[in-house]
Image (spheres, rainbow, N blue to C red):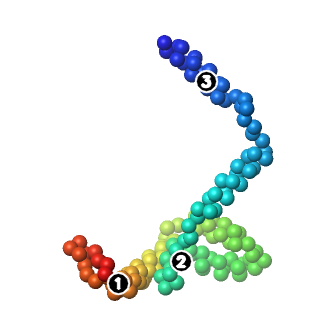
Amino acid sequence: MKGAKGKGAARVSQEALKPNDRKVGKRKAATAKLDSGSKRQGKREKKAKKDPNKPKRPPSAFFVFLEEFRKTFKKENPNVTAVSAVGKAAGGKWKSMSPAEKAPYESKAEKLKSEYGKKMNAYNKKQVTNLVPFFNSVDAFGSLLCV
C-alpha cells in the first residue's frame, strides 16, 4: 500500500509541475507586479505627526566620535565630498581603536543619554498634565477615567 500511495503522489506532483495551460511571460509577470504594488499604496495608513517638542534621542558613542572625526577628515581631505567616504573612513578607524581610546566617546554618550532620560521624563510629565483636564477621576488601578 505504501508503494502505491507514493507512486500516485509522485504522478500528481509531476503533473502539477508541468505548465500545461498556464501562460507565463514577461508582460504577465510585469503587470502582476504593478497590480500588487498599486493595491499596497491604497491601503497605506498615514503616519502620526511627530511632536516637534519631543527631545531627540542622544547619539551613540560612534556618532559622538563621528562628529569630531568629520572635522579632522575634512581638513585632511578637502576635495572629498562624498558622505559615504567619510563614513567608511570613520568606521574603519572606530574598529581599529582600542577600548581605552573609545572610552571618552562612550562616557560622553552616557552623559548625553542620562540628560535625554531627564528631558524625556519632563516631557512625559508635561504630556500627562496636558491630558488631565479631559479626565475626571482615577479608578482603583490608577487609570484615568474619561468624563
| Residue type indicated by callout 1 | Phe
Could you tell me which quadrant the C terminus lies in? bottom left
Q: Which residue is mark 1?
A: 134
Q: Which mark is residue 3?
A: none
Q: Residue at x 70, y 72 (%)?
A: 83
Q: Which residue is mark 3?
A: 12
Helix, strand or loop under label 1 = helix
Residue 128 placement (x, y as % from top left): 36, 82
| Residue type indicated by callout 3 | Val
- Alpha-carbon neighbours of circle 3 within 10 Å: few (<14), some, or many (≥20)? few
Q: Which mark is residue 49?
A: 2
Q: CA distance from mark 2 to mark 3?
A: 54 Å
Disc nearer the start of the sequence (2/1): 2
Residue nearest the viewer, comparing 118 with 107:
118
- Alpha-carbon neighbours of circle 1 within 10 Å: few (<14), some, or many (≥20)? few
User: Left or right of 93: which side holds 112?
Assistant: left
The answer to whether one can see residue 85 in this image is yes
Q: CA distance from mark 2 to mark 1?
A: 21 Å
Residue 54 placement (x, y as % from top left): 48, 82
Taking 93 as reference, is 107 above or below it? below
Helix, strand or loop under label 2 = loop
- Alpha-carbon neighbours of circle 2 within 10 Å: few (<14), some, or many (≥20)? few
Disc nearer the start of the sequence (2/3): 3
Residue 145 placement (x, y as % from top left): 29, 77
Residue 71 placement (x, y as % from top left): 65, 81
Disc nearer the start of the sequence (3/1): 3
Helix, strand or loop under label 3 = helix
- The residue mark sitting in front, 2 or 3, is 3
Q: Badges 2 and 3: C-beta atoms under 8 Å apart?
A: no
Residue 137's quadrant in the figure?
bottom left
